[in-house]
Image: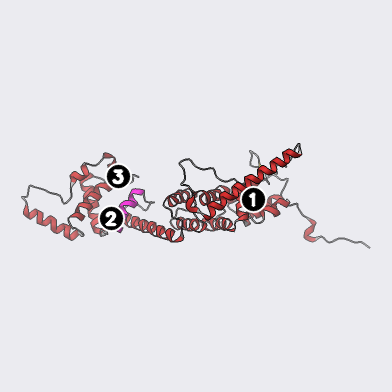
Amino acid sequence: MEYRLELGAWGSVFAVPTELTDKHLKLAGAAQLKVILWFLRHAGEAFTTADISSALSMHEADVRDCMQYWIEAGLIAHNDNNILTPPMPAVQTAPDTETESTAGTEEKAAETETITEIQAETRHEPEKTQTRLPSRPEKPDQKYLSERMTSDPGIAFLMQSADEIFGRLTNISDKATLLMIHEYDGLPVEVLIMLMQYAHDAGKCNMRYIEKTAISWADEEITTLEAAERKIKELSEKNTAARRYQRIIGLDDHSPTKKELEFADLWINKRKYPDELIREAYETCIDNKGKFIQKYTNTILENWYKTGITSVSQLKNQQSERKKAKPQDSYSPSYDISEYESTSILDEEGWDDE
């Protein structure tokens, strides 16, 4: 009689490092775990990120982000030909003497205590966080990032929210930037999430814009949900005004410059000029200068505003009355050209200047 052990799926297995499950099972995302499992299954073979992308139906850029996570975790490495290979295990040497071991332990404990105190101060008293210095601070490394995500559920939630808002797996560099903003600039997790969501809705969901805006918010002490809501409302109103401004002037749809935002906010939100009056000032500028110059157009509108002109009909009536009151060969515009001519020539660069 013949006997046989039916292993089924267990007939073909591969090894998984205990560090992966003990340390990274909680920290890594679903896509990162899929990639490392595929990698381990094909250990010893030569393959590229394109092979993994095809096998897992993932975008190759996402695969590279996932691989970068495991590279920085020290579980895998890659060579110059993009062939992925396991790294050499680190060789650990025992301390020469008991004294060295004790000293190292005490030093590490003191360092950990100092870091813990700084984290506690940053987390609970953001108002004491210093303003970002001109020199860029060093980003947290992956080890510190992992420790913070493990020890603080709020940080883990921040990183998870970033993945959801960005619609992709954020890489280690992005996560480190968010942690740096939180701990160095003092923006709470909930405010950072609101900022990322606003950036996404505004079509500016990139870490460069988020970091720059976060630094500005920190300087303005926008550290509560209420303050963030007010700021987002203000920014949204400016963007809405800028889109209307572009439509009135006949400009192509594009991301507005800083000056366009300023003039759009002034003309539409503050002065509340009607569309046709803005268009009339624009056409007057083109007639006189041959091109659109924002400051020149603003001078025309400001002079009309000072004389109480709030509509094109009022403007036409005023021009008609002036023609009747003066000889035919004289001309007096309804705006002060000398005010514009006295400005710096740098203001005449056109609508796309910053």
Whether residue 142 is in magenta: the answer is no
Circle 2: is it few (<14), some (14-19), or many (20+) Cα within 10 Å? many
Is 6 left or right of 117, judged from the image as shown? right
Whole-percent x, y for residue 155 in the image:
57, 55
Mark carried by residue 52: 1
Whole-percent x, y for residue 30 in the image:
63, 57
Can residue 267 be spotted in the picture?
Answer: yes
Cα distance between the residues tagged 3 and 1: 50 Å
Numbered range of the magenta stretch: 258-269
Is 202 left or right of 286, judged from the image as shown? right
Q: Nearer the viewer, mark 2 or mark 3?
A: 2
Local SS, label 2:
helix
Circle 2 residue: 267
Local SS, label 1:
helix
Local SS, label 3:
loop
The amino acid type, in three-letter code, at marker 2 is Trp
Q: Nearer the viewer, mark 3 or mark 1?
A: 3
Q: Which tag, 2 or 1, sits closer to the chain's start?
A: 1
Pick the quarter of the image with the N terminus.
bottom right
Mark carried by residue 92: none
Q: Which tag, 3 or 1, sits closer to the chain's start?
A: 1
Whole-percent x, y for residue 230 in the image:
40, 60
The amino acid type, in three-letter code, at marker 1 is Ile
Q: Nearer the viewer, residue 259 or 85?
A: 259
Point out the residue furthest to the top here: 96
